Image (cartoon, rainbow, N blue to C red):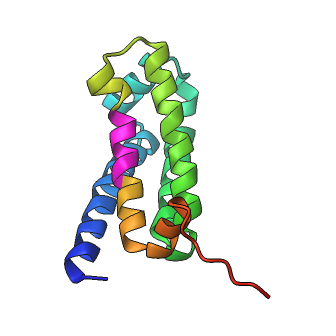
Amino acid sequence: MSTSRLWFAYALSAVAVMFFLMDGGMKVARAQPSVVATTALGFPDSSVRLVGAILLLLTLLYLVPATAAIGAVLLTGFLGGAVAAQLRMEAPLWSHILFPVYVAGFLWGGLLLRRPDLMAVVLGRATRSTP
């Protein structure tokens, strides 16, 4: 794997991770903008800290190489919930509804570029070893 490809992969992952750390950290700290935005989506005020803690835990899973794939899968589910919440509120498509999809693109792009074995599985090119 080329060094430039690896750096690009880490840069993609870093963008997603920085977003998750900021969002999760603001929720755990109950920063006013985060609480207002979360409750505006219909979530109860009492759930803001829990949502932030879950997001930080999933981000930690993504950061550990041995659990990065399951972390990416779980974060994708989390982002799917964000899309659903935005759809329910009839938010603007390109800026609000699709934003979690953009973040998922960075998340998976970074992971797949730095893990060619996962790329092969996703593309259906994984080789099977026969006993």
Can residue 48 be seen in this snapshot? no
In this view, the residue in front, 21 or 69, is 69
> Which residue is pictured at 28% across the width and 76% down the height?
6
Q: What percent of the width, then of the height, locates residue 46?
A: 57, 28
Question: Quick check: 14 above or below 96?
Answer: below
> Which residue is pictured at 35% across the width and 30% down the height?
98
Q: What percent of the width, then of the height, locates residue 112?
A: 42, 65
User: How many numbered marks does the figure carry?
Assistant: 0
Q: Residue furthest top?
A: 90
Q: Residue furthest bottom?
A: 131
Question: Quick check: 2 above or below 35?
Answer: below
Screen quadrant of the C terminus = bottom right
Q: Residue furthest right?
A: 131
> Which residue is pictured at 50% across the width and 72% down the height?
64
Left or right, 101 with reference to 5: right
Q: What percent of the width, then of the height, locates residue 116?
A: 44, 74
Question: Quick check: 54 above or below 32?
Answer: below
Screen quadrant of the N terminus = bottom left
Question: Quick check: 43 above or below 27?
Answer: above
Q: What percent of the width, then of the height, locates residue 66?
A: 56, 76
Is residue 101 shown in magenta?
A: yes
Q: Main secondary structure of the magenta part?
A: helix
Is residue 5 shown in magenta?
A: no
In this view, the residue in front, 22 or 90, is 90
Can residue 33 be seen in this snapshot? yes
In this view, the residue in front, 16 or 38, is 16
Find the magenta span and give its range: 99-106
